[in-house]
Image (cartoon, rainbow, N blue to C red):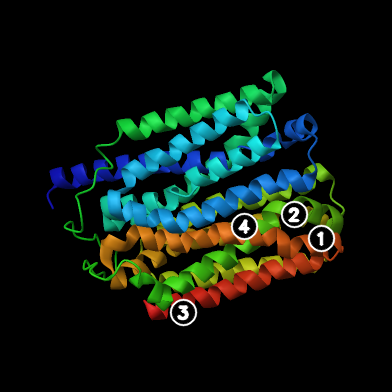
Amino acid sequence: MNSSAATSVLRSDIRVISLIGFAHGTSHFFHLLLPPLFPWLMPEFGLSFTEAGAMMTVFFVVSGIGQALSGFVVDRIGPRRVLLAGIACFVLAALLLSVAKGYAMLLAVGALAGLGNCVFHPADFTLLNRKVSGARLGHAFSAHGLSGSLGWAIAPIFLTGIAAAAGWRAAALAAAALGALAWAVVWLGREATALADGGAKAVKAAPGEKVSAGGTASTFGFLGVAAVWLCFAFFLLVTMAFGALQNYATPLMHAMYGLPLAAAAATLTAFLLGGAAGIAAGGVLAVRGASHEGLIALALGAAALAAGVIATGVLPAWSVMPAMAVMGFCSGIAGPSRDLLVRRAATARFGQGAYGRVYGFVYSGLDLGLALSPLIFGPLMDAGRFGAVLAGVAFLQGASILAALRVGSRS
C-alpha cells in the first residue's frame, strides 16, 4: 500500500472510531439517566429504594432481551439505521422523563431507555469490524471501551449539577438535548458508517487472525456453536463481578476498612479510573498479535488476586484505594482482547454476515449479569458478609478465565 492510500485508510479509521466512540459514550451516559436523579425522583413520587431500583431492572431486562434480538435487525438492514433508532429512543426517554406524572411513566422511561441501549453493541461492533482496518481493531475496541467509561463519568456530574440548579425536569430536558446532538452527529457522519449490502466486502483480519468470509450458515446457526455460548458465559460472569463492585463498593469499603463514606466512594472511582487506563493499555497489547485468551487469563487472574487480597480485610486503610485501582487496571486490560475474542468466535464459522446477531447475543450477557448481580450479592450485604462479596467477585473473575480459555480452544 502506497503512502497516499495508507493515509486515506488511517483517516477513515480515525473517523469511524471517533464516530462510534461518541455514540457509545452516549449510550453509557443514558445508562445513568435515572440513578443520579433518584434523590429528586424518590421524594417527588414517594418511591422506596426497591421501587427506584425496579426502574433499572426494567432497563436491563428490556436491554438484555432487545440486545439479543437487535443483532438480527442489524444484520438485516444494517447498523446505521439501527444506531439512529436507538439514539432516538434515548431522546424520547429523556423527554418522557421531563413530563413524568407518576411511577408508571418512570417505568416507561426505564423501558424506553433500555430499548435504546440494546442496539449499541451489535451496531457498534459490526461497524468497527467491517470499517476499521484489522491492524487498528485493538485500538478501536480500546477507544470504544474508553468512550463508554467517559459517558458513565459525565452523566452524574451533568445531571445532578443541572438538577441542583434548575430541577430534575430541566436535567431531563438537557439529557434529551444531548441525545439529539448525538443523533445529529451520527446522521451527519452517515457516509463514514455506510456499508456495502450483504457479505460482499471481505472481512479485515486482525494481526495473526484467520477469519472466514463465508456467512452461509442459517440465521440461528450461531446458537449451535459452543464458542458463542462460552463468550456469553464469559460476559455474564465478568459483569456479575463488576456489578457487585459498582453497586456495593462504597458500603463495602466503609464497613470492612472503616473508611469515611467519601473515601469509600473514592475507591470505586479509583477502580473505574484504573479500568479506563487498563483499557488503553489493553488496546496496545491486543494489536501486537499475542494470544488474546492468554492475555485475558493473566489480566483477570491478577484482578481476582487483588479482589481476594482486599476480601481478607487485612490491608491498611490507606492501601485500599490503590488496590482497587490495580484491580480495575487489570480488569480493563482484558477488555480489547475480549472483544477481539468475540470477533474470532463470530468469524470462525459465519463471517461478517453474523456480526450483529453474534455480538448482540453475546453482549446480552452483560445486561443479564448486571440484573443478577444485586440478587446474588444483595443478600450477602444484608447479612453483613462483606468479605464474601469480594470473594465472590474473585471467584467470578476466575471462572471467567476458564470460559475465555475455552473460547480460544473452540474458535
Query: Which residue matches tag 1?
Result: 381
**Can residue 183 be seen from the camera position used here?**
yes
402 to 52, vertically: above or below: below
Q: CA distance from mark 2 to mark 3?
A: 30 Å
Task: Tell me, yes or no, whether the two marked residues, 1 and 2, touch with CB atoms within 8 Å.
Answer: yes
The image's mark for residue 370 is 4
Mark 4 or 3: in front is 4
* Mark closer to the chain start, 4 or 3: 4
Q: Position of residue 365 (x, y in %)?
A: 53, 62
How far apart are the two marked residues, 1 and 4, measured between alpha carbons?
A: 16 Å
Label 3: few (<14), some or many (≥20) within 10 Å?
Answer: some
Indicate which label's residue lies in the foreground, 2 or 4: 4
Report crowding for label 4: few under 14, some 14 to 19, many 20 or more residues within 10 A (C-alpha): many
- The CA span between labels 1 and 2 is 8 Å
Residue type at mark 4 is Leu
Mark 2 and mark 3 in contact? Answer it, CB < 8 Å. no
